[in-house]
Image (cartoon, rainbow, N blue to C red):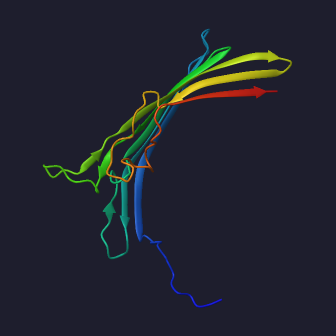
Amino acid sequence: VGAVDYVRDTYINIARRKVSGIDFGMAYKLPDTRFGDFSFKAAYARMNTFEQQRDADSPAISDLEMNGLPKGRGIASVYWKGRQMDAGLRGNYISGFYDTSAPWDDNGNMFRVESWLTFNAFVGFRFGEEDGVQNYLRLGVNNLFDEDPPFADENRSFYESVHDPRGRFLYAEWRVQM
């Protein structure tokens, strides 16, 4: 078999990591109406602390709001369901953060990657309910307003681990239930 030439070990065991934050969520369904059922949902996660210490002798460093670690993320949606149709709208929010690899401005400030807000929407139709077979057709769009990811000093000009480069995306879905 042979002798081992080298061992590539890139894993770093962090001595300490301190993370704190708060998650908030709510859901509400209106009482049934003659116009259909309406429901609302929202969720927000806010990170208050994210500190790491590489080893026992090094200082604790806060990476919060730095290089792809936003302080907050949230979603909010409204959904309507009628007898033969349904529809929904969802907003997706990611707060901004600083990009330390970008040049600083003339005032000595770090480059800020802007917050990002996108919307998704759909409308669905139920039809053909015969002999126990029901069809459902959904037409939707993700990134309704075609928002580009915020600019960053990265290989592809945005943070791939945080933002989605796909622009407006139309889709159709057809389900058959037997």
| Quadrant hosting residue 80 | top right
> 121 and 155: which one is in front?
155
Image check: 130 left or right of 15? Answer: right
> Exactly how many numbered labels are in the figure?
0
Picture residue at 58% right of the left edge, 91% below the top: 3
Residue sticking out furthest to the left: 107
Residue sticking out furthest to the right: 131
x and y percentages locating residue 6 in the rendered image: 51, 84
Q: In this view, does 84 lie above or below 98?
A: above
x and y percentages locating residue 2 in the rendered image: 62, 90
Q: In this view, does 126 lie above or below 147?
A: above
Q: Can residue 109 be seen in this view?
A: yes
Picture residue at 22% right of the left edge, 54% below the top: 103
> 28 and 108: which one is in front?
108
Q: Can residue 80 be seen in this view?
A: no
Picture residue at 36% right of the left edge, 47% below the top: 71
> 146 and 75: which one is in front?
146
x and y percentages locating residue 106 in the rendered image: 13, 49
Residue sticking out furthest to the top: 34
Image check: 177 left or right of 172? Answer: right
x and y percentages locating residue 50 in the rendered image: 37, 56
- Check the picture and name the quadrant holding the C terminus: top right
- Check the picture and name the quadrant holding the N terminus: bottom right
Residue sticking out furthest to the bottom: 3
Picture residue at 68% right of the left edge, 14% below the top: 84
Q: In this view, does 16 lie above or below 32?
A: below
